[in-house]
Image (cartoon, rainbow, N blue to C red):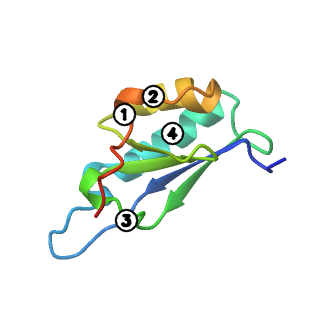
Amino acid sequence: MSYYERHIFFCLNQRDGGQACCADHAAQDAFDHCKAQVKAAGLAGPGKVRVNKAGCLDRCAGAPVAVVYPEAVWYTFVDRSDIDEIVESHLKNGQPVERLRLPADVGR
């Protein structure tokens, strides 16, 4: 059994030279909001959910991005309501949010 049931990693990378990056799309705010929502819902901690910062996840064209493991579900999101939906549906209830899934062919 894994130490955490699920991990969600948020790319917070900032690129130079005007290249697409998650930091330019309020990724830090999304991370902070997710962390607060997971804690408020009682989902944080061993055996539950861990919210992590990540450097570049190399899917910059879909920015901002996050990925949930162990299911390896990649998300893109627009605002806090999208994060709330990911927390409630996927992190709490194990059901990926299909409308927010990042298409498989989106890369850097």
Q: Which residue is mark 2?
A: 97
Task: Depth check: give the residue in front, 16 or 100.
Answer: 100
The dot on residue 61 is none
Q: Is residue 49 left or right of residue 98?
A: right
For the residue marked with disc 3, what is the amino acid? Answer: Asp
Instruction: Find numbered disc 1 in the image and state the secondary structure of the residue it sits on.
Output: helix
Asked if the residue at tag 1 contacts the one at tag 3, i.e. Cβ–Cβ closer than 8 Å, the answer is no
> Circle 3 — which element?
loop
| Closer to the eye: label 4 or 3 | 3
Q: CA distance from mark 3 to mark 2?
A: 21 Å
Is 105 situated above or below 30?
below
Element type at marker 4? Answer: helix
Q: Which residue is mark 4?
A: 34
The percent coordinates of residue 1 (x first, y second) are 84, 47
Vertical side of 65 occupied by 100: above or below: above
User: What amino acid is found at the position of numbered circle 4 in the picture?
Assistant: Cys
N-terminal of the pair, mark 1 or mark 4, is 4
Q: Which residue is mark 1?
A: 100
Question: Which mark is on residue 58?
Answer: 3
Q: Could you give the CA–CA distance between mark 3 and mark 1, rounded to whole angstroms?
A: 18 Å
Q: Residue 55: horizontal and vertical position, in percent?
A: 45, 67
Q: In terms of sequence position, does the residue under pointer 2 or pointer 4 come before the other? A: 4
